[in-house]
Amino acid sequence: MNAANANLLNLRSLLAGNYDNIYIFTHLRPDGDAIGSSLALANALKTGCKTVEVFCPDVIPSRYSFLPGVDNFQVSFTAREGKSLAFILDCSDLRRLNNMGEKVLQLDRVVNIDHHITNEKFGDVNLIDASAASTGEIIYQILKDDYELNYDISLCLYVAISSDTGSFKYENTTPQTMEIAARLLEKGINPFYVSQKIFDEYPASTIFLLRDALGSLRFDETGKIAWMVVDDAMLKKHGAESSDLDGFINYVKNIESVEVGIFFYQTDKGETKVGFRSKTVDIASVAYSLGGGGHPRAAGCSLRGEPQEVIAKVVQSVAQLFCKG
């Protein structure tokens, strides 16, 4: 029996246990995989008559408001009395839980479920599968034999999987991904409706913000690296939220000559959040060296310091990828 199968059996044993409280956590700036995976697991466990609470240290973006149970997310956590089981989903390290991270480690059992290759394996049980296109795929494998995948659960899983595969167009899309998606569609999921909600609809404020962001577009001397910059003042100008920035980085990466696109979001708190997208090189190694993590083609980190110094440091780090060999 390999380690993944052993951890899956261990997880099923835990789920059969007698826990007073089950908590599900996901990361800052939640995406569709984080949100969908959390809600799918929560909805499934609730059908087994368990008390389940879901937590995220950020507000859930409005584009996911159609998901069943989304209003149950809480932004702060205080443990209840009694034996507790915690699930941490789609989260490579506990820093991404913000101030909830330290509290999580004080709970009785922690299950870490993720598909990021940079995961730090902080759980009592670590179910990490870097070959999975999304955490949603892993949750599907956990649930499919022991729980009825009703419409609500299937919708959440479909959103999780389609989000992290870019509507099944990224290179992480595998035959298994498509097989799982097909099973979920059999439950009555409308792919046009989902795609419209999470990929194709934007408030006008987002489009105006994108217009200004594109004005910041810059390239390195080789043309292989390009970046875009947004700050909190730009968000306030257009009445936008940080969640409206989701997808902006693809406009940088999709430029014909560009190999790595970088997105800098400079906050009023002296922190710069950095997103990376790559066509060919392993960008996760750069993100990890800067204190972040992610996937070979999609990763991120957060850095403190003067904005222009952060940009120079990050661009220089990415440039080193093209100097190897």
Image (cartoon, rainbow, N blue to C red):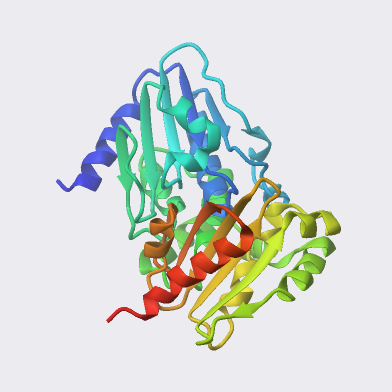
Does 69 appear above or below 30? above
Of the pair 45 and 222, the residue shown nearer to us: 222
Residue 304 placed where, x, y %?
A: 56, 51
Residue 133 placed where, x, y %?
A: 42, 61
Residue 297 placed where, x, y %?
A: 44, 69
Going 64% across and 59% down the picture, which residue do you hit? 265
Q: Residue furthest top?
A: 81
Going 34% across and 57% down the picture, which residue do you hit? 130
Left or right of 293 on screen, residue 241: right
Of the pair 121 and 167, the residue shown nearer to us: 121
Left or right of 70 on screen, residue 82: left
Residue 290 placed where, x, y %?
A: 43, 56
Does 308 appear above or below 5? below
Of the pair 113 and 271, the residue shown nearer to us: 271
Report the number of numbered marks.
0
Quadrant location, the C terminus: bottom left
Does 255 appear above or below 296? below
Going 35% across and 43% down the picture, which residue do you hit? 145
Task: Confirm whether residue 47 shows in the render.
Answer: no
Task: Confirm whether residue 162 shows in the render.
Answer: yes
Going 37% across and 69% down the picture, which residue do you hit? 175
